[in-house]
Amino acid sequence: MTKFMTRAGILLTTFAMLVACSGNNGGSSNTGTTTEKPSSTNAGVEKPKEPVKFSISMRTLNVAYVEKHPNINDDKYVKKLEEMTNADLDIRLIPHNEYQDKMVQMFATNDIPDVVQGSGGISGPELAGAVENGVFLPLNDLLKEHGQDLLNFIPQEAWDRMTDSKSGNIYGIPEVLSNPSRRATWIRTDLLKKVGKEIPTTVEETLDVLRAFKAAGVEQPFAGRQNFKYADTFFGSYDVFGYLNQFKLFPDGQVKPSFFDTENMKKAIETYKTMYDEGLISKEFATIESTDFRSNVTSGKAGMWSMNANELPIWGAQLKNNVPDAEVALIPSPVGTDGKGGYAHYNPVTRSFYINAAAKDKAADIVKFFNWMVSEQAELFFSFGIEGDDYKVEGGEAKFEVPTDTEGTDKLRYLNGWLWMIQDTTYNKRVSSLSESGKQMIDAFDNMLSKEGRSAIEFDPRLEALVQNPDLNPKSDEMPPLILEQVLRIVYGKDSIDSYDKVLEEYLSKGGADIIKEATERYNNKENAFE
Amino acid sequence: MASKLEPRGAGAAPSPRIRAGGGHVLLGYMWKYKALYFISLPGLFYFLLFKYVPLMGSVIAFQDFNLFTGITGSKWVGLKHFERMFSHYDFINILKNTLLLGIYDILFAFTAPIILALLLNEVRLMLYKKIIQTIMYAPHFLSWVIVSGIFVGILSPESGVLNVVLGWFGIDPIYFLGDDSYIRSVLVGSGLWRDVGWGTIIYLAALAGINPDLYEAAEIDGAGRWKQTLSITIPALLPVITILFLLKIGDFLDYGFERVFVFQNPLNIRNSEILDTYIYKAGLKQLQFSYATAIGVFKSVVGLFLLLIANTLSKKATGESLY
């Protein structure tokens, strides 16, 4: 019996050790092999230096070309990129919808690639505190030595998001969005002509136009969507979003989410209630998800909606395919009592790239790789593709035909927005200036959107009190669940508009008071607070 | 269940001898049946590796777990996370939702396959029976995301079939998913639709095992179909029903994350937030791993106690039990 027990004991311990070790082994052996092995793709005759081999994790971002590709590392554009930068990439895709879960898993199993792609600041939830725990390399000296072009190209406000304010260390290389006003209000100008109305400017005028659309038989005069995502136009008119980056300094000296402006918030809620009661928005907008939203718009059911402005060429073309008479335009967003409007501004950093501290010896080459991304050569490659295959050079000028089929647009989206890691993502200058709708979009960005939108105070890392209270924690484009629930109940007529005061009291008693206290303190101390 | 699969020779017979002779007799027996023990090794390893080793991870419920320092490097905090859970302002409501859904699930989703199996058993036309059976299994292989898509379509107030039918009777469209009072019915109903056919499989297998002589004898004695069902079929099914019921009780608080999450929206959240979805939102999304684990441990402990109680009761009442 005892013998049996000892044997079983030994067995158990071996197993436990095996399990415990396997996680760590995976990580270290990975980084080990990547440094050593010479690549076979490049004949190193004319190039004296071996290509730098590194692994990089990237979110698929719902880019169809990437998600459908059998192996993105064998893609001809990736091969071309490797050839141009003398690099050998091992791209590891992270599914768009499970991004945060997979990233956390990656850190937990210590299977961290040489370069990790984050989305936004250095303390985003997808990084799970990796920066504070010393997983990544500070890049200050490397950038000075090998990344001068990056330092010149990327604006200071984006670098600020990559910097730990206590130590002054820069941890990531950011992809930037120079125009933070990314979403726009869209309207069907053909319908507008049909009902004989002008482009509306105020909330009241907009409601009148929507009523006229309804009378003319438009199914959904305003396209609604779950949780007011991409349907928050009128919260913008009254400046009461209350999202993660929408804290405001109130006259009483406290920093609170902007929905504490009760007077304006009630006006915004009542606008939606009117729309719901009069059928200007779908009766079931609380369960309409992104795919249905898109099909509602592109099948011509909607008269007015909100979407990212850079989608204009694509959505516009799809709509025209289904409804040949349709004409669509981006218009200034309806303004509220302060004469302004627009959507919540985006973070100036869209993606960011961090270098694993374990990949120290190739860090210089990796920085050079990213530095190349902002060069003229890179711009041409990522805009059009490969010379000969995708575009021709005639008389010293690149000739490119903008694709209109799905396959072509998918490929373009991949090159322009996914594989091009460091750029200004507002819009692609070269491609957009070739088409009519593209020019319209550039005009909207430069002359209209740059003047609208709501920016406010943001805390990064986010407030500790928010992490403790998920019910009170807003997303980057959604109100906190507690407030959202009540707003929807009021719009759907389940509660009266006066119940909004009560929900604010509830917010305070459930931990909101701590949030406001912490926000005010951090704002006054200028501790990682961005305006 | 595992005990039932053990070879009778190795399990039942030697027990009195072990008591008399001591350890080396057991070893002797193990040697004698070494092939059987050898065959069982992969199964044992499976349970050790995938069920018991991960179980040890539950200790992070008593720590402030840090992803980068691991279990050994994280600080011990005692019952802090359990206190936080019990003092949460919404805890009672979430627990109530979980319990109610669990009860409804046992009332409807557990009994429905039994009734369906009995009904199918009475169908005389073999081809018809097979077709019905196949149609009813099919939804089991759909993921919850797809099931929710189908139900959102059916229940839509503007274009859904159900509301069109209600319209024929002059009833105004109802926004089923946008209302606290319907969400539980939707959750239980969608689960019923998806899994009822699948649930009948075990019962049908048990029904097929009933000796036809019993029915013949009953018929000669003048018993009708109804009497036969009551006196032969149901008693024959009872052991299977008891075992499945006990297993179900063990999962009482595990209503399932995905099936609820896909139906949730702010208009129905008051009645649809359950422990599983709360763990996801408060624990995993906010990276509060210890907190999430603490709630999970609570769930498991409650499940274990319910199982123990139900098993004891069942042993006393019917003689059937899991162990």
Image: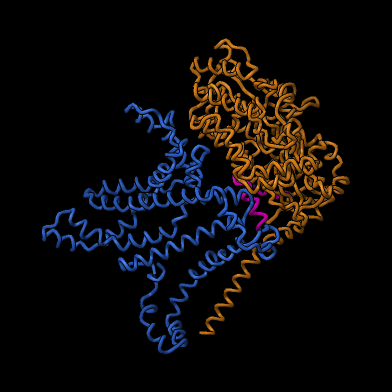
Chain colours: A orange, B blue
Q: Residue at x 67, y 36 (%)?
A: A257
Q: Residue B60: x, y in percent? A: 62, 61
Principal secondary structure, stretch drawn in magenta: helix
Q: Which residues are magenta?
A: A89-108
Q: State whether residue A353 is above or below residue B208.
A: above
Q: Nearer the viewer, residue A152 or A243?
A: A243
Is residue A287 magenta-colored? no
Q: Nearer the viewer, residue A323 or B83?
A: B83
Q: Residue at x 53, y 84 (%)?
A: A2
Q: Nearer the viewer, residue B141 or B115?
A: B115
Q: State whether residue B256 is above or below residue A186.
A: below
Q: Nearer the viewer, residue B84 or A74?
A: B84
Q: For residue A332, which quarter of the picture?
A: top right
Question: Is residue A403 visible to us here?
Answer: no
Q: Residue B169: x, y in percent? A: 32, 28
Q: For residue B309, which quarter of the picture?
A: bottom left
